[in-house]
Image: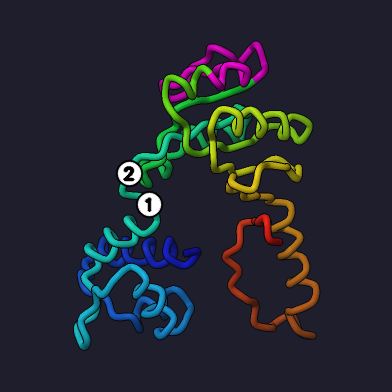
Amino acid sequence: MARLPVYQRILEELLRSGTTTVSSELLASAAQVNAAKVRKDLSHLGSFGTRGAGYDAAFLIEQIDRGLGLDRIWPVVIAGIGHLGRALAHSQGFAARNFRVAALLDSNPAIIGEQVDGVVVRHPDDLSQIAGEEPLSIGVITTPASAAQRVADQMVGAGVRSILNFAPQMLEVPPEVLLRYVDLSIELQVMSFYLSHLTGEGGEGRMPVIRSIGLSPSPSE
């Protein structure tokens, strides 16, 4: 699953450059994996390739969209309208991937009532009312660490079943709620480790390609 968005981005770039058919070898080379892995990954979506001819790029993008659940609109609520929250709210990538920012939350009275790209910022205590007007699928937390758990609890109480947490705080949610973390400081620490230990004596060692965006604990971990 984690590789499918990578394949999709490569396919879109190839399509923009005029390439309409792509082989598993070409896709594997661009994604820095082997061709057998690409074919196995794509086989979970169905049988789309033609031996000797490859994959129709546009059709494969559609199938990856379907496999990732991007063939529908997902309403998103962002809590914490500081610099990061505003940047995410303004992101064109959300709409391009069928994620629609439906609600914005902040507890700062100076920000409540402000409009960001046409969406009014409301208090987190209004979340249940907002969800009653429109079910919310995904919650994004960009609050200070001290407020993150309370906001997560409010999101869960309002029916949100998927949370992306940018706050530097480990959260507790029910097992049926998908929780993922994006911690840029952890990513920098990972880079620091590789720079310190894996560059070789002359600093010319081969560095790995790391596509992780932070911790993603599951109930079984």
Is residue 109 a member of the stretch shown in magenta? yes
Give the x, y percent position of residue 68: 40, 56
For label 1, the residue is 69
Which is nearer the eye, 130 or 52? 130
Q: Residue at x 56, y 28 (%)?
A: 158
Q: Residue at x 29, y 61 (%)?
A: 63
For label 2, the residue is 72
Give the x, y percent position of residue 192: 76, 65
Labels 1 & 2 near each other (Cβ < 8 A):
yes
* 119 horizontally vs 8: left or right: right
Is residue 90 a member of the stretch shown in magenta? no
Q: Residue at x 53, y 25 (%)?
A: 104
> Magenta span covers which residues?
107-128
Give residue 153's quadrant in the image.
top right
Give the quadrant of the C terminus.
Answer: bottom right
Q: Amino acid at mark 1?
A: Gly
Answer yes or no: is residue 119 visible.
Answer: yes
Give me the C-alpha separation between circle 1 and circle 2.
Answer: 7 Å
